[in-house]
Image (tube, rainbow, N blue to C red):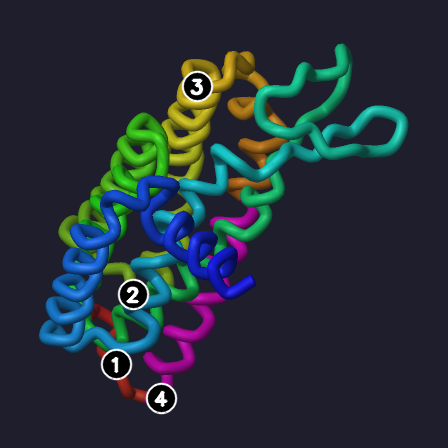
């Protein structure tokens, strides 16, 4: 039993490549040291683990298939004609925004370093196309936030909502199309099984809910004078 637990743990840690155990462990220790040295604590580690997990999940978590009720459509299974597909992980994407806010409180703009680490590890734990799409989606989101910060006078809490509203349709399209391509190449599924309107809408709603929550928390801190409304 203990051996089974150990093998399962090693398999999860190495993404099914136990020969990589030493390299992965050394990489994770180095990652822990770097994040800690940059001021990251619990939220930073959660954030860096969450992004590769979400990217990995788009390859292994089954779709919810709605047609006369719903059932689970596991990766690689044929879709029922006329059914509506929804990937359950699109429901929790807003959590990334909330966790990112807590990391930014710990590390300020060094949160971008954590994002880079998370995307880098995604290339190991997830399919490369999904990892690349995820990296592009985060870059688009950060670019629009930078544009609003540079060229407008909006306070931080307002900027978060506006930049999310502008960026979400674009970065969601990039990510879901990349995830759809990855599942097509690796599982033979149609791109539209993942890149569909239902996933797109729910993904954006999840992001906007997260953005509104973060905006509310920051607005309270702005009004209390604990942070500057024009903080980067």
Q: Secondary structure at mark 3?
A: helix
Q: Secondary structure at mark 4?
A: helix
The residue drawn where x is 49% and y is 42% is: 57
Residue 217 vs 177, above or below: the answer is below
Residue 160 vs 229, above or below: the answer is above
The x, y position of residue 98, in whole percent, is 43, 64
Residue matched to label 4: 224
For this view, does 47 lie left or right of residue 63?
A: left
- Whether tag 3 and tag 2 are in contact, CB under 8 A, the answer is no
Residue matched to label 2: 156
Residue 230: which quarter of the image? bottom left
The residue drawn where x is 33% and y is 38% is: 134
Region in magenta: 205-224
Instruction: Give the alpha-carbon distance from disc 4 to disc 2, as whole Å.
Output: 14 Å
Residue matched to label 3: 186
Question: Which quadrant is the N terminus positioned in?
Answer: bottom right
Q: Counting other residues with Cα less than 10 Å from the Cα at mark 2, is it few (<14), some (14-19), or many (20 or more)? A: many
| Mark 1 or mark 2: whose residue is earlier in sequence | 2
Residue 224 vs 66, above or below: the answer is below
Q: Choose mark 4 or mark 3, whichever is in front.
A: 3
For this view, does 168 lie left or right of residue 131?
A: right
The residue drawn where x is 55% and y is 44% is: 89
Residue 223 among those drawn in magenta: yes
The x, y position of residue 232, in whole percent, is 18, 64
- Whether tag 1 and tag 3 are in contact, CB under 8 A, the answer is no
Residue matched to label 1: 227
Q: Secondary structure at mark 1?
A: loop
| Mark 3 or mark 2: whose residue is earlier in sequence | 2
Residue 170 among those drawn in magenta: no
């Amino acid at each position: 039993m203990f051996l089974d637990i150990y093998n399962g743990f090693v398999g999860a840690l190495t993404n099914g490549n136990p020969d990589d155990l030493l390299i992965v462990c050394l990489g994770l220790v180095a990652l822990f040291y770097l994040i800690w040295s940059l001021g990251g604590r619990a939220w930073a580690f959660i954030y860096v683990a969450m992004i590769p997990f979400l990217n990995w999940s788009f390859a292994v978590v089954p779709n919810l298939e709605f047609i006369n009720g719903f059932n689970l459509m596991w990766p690689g299974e044929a879709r029922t004609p006329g059914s509506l597909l929804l990937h359950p992980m699109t429901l929790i994407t807003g959590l990334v925004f909330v966790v990112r806010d807590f990391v930014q409180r710990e590390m300020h703009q060094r949160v971008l370093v954590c994002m880079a680490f998370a995307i880098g590890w995604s290339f190991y734990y997830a399919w490369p196309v999904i990892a690349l799409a995820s990296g592009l989606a985060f870059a688009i989101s950060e670019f629009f936030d930078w544009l609003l910060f540079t060229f407008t006078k909006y306070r931080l809490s307002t900027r978060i909502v506006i930049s999310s509203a502008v960026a979400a349709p674009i970065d969601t399209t990039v990510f879901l199309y990349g995830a759809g391509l990855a599942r097509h190449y690796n599982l033979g599924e149609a791109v539209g099984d993942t890149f569909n309107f239902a996933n797109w809408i729910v993904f954006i709603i999840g992001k906007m809910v997260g953005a509104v929550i973060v905006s509310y928390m920051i607005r309270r801190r702005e009004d209390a004078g604990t942070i500057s409304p024009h903080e980067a």
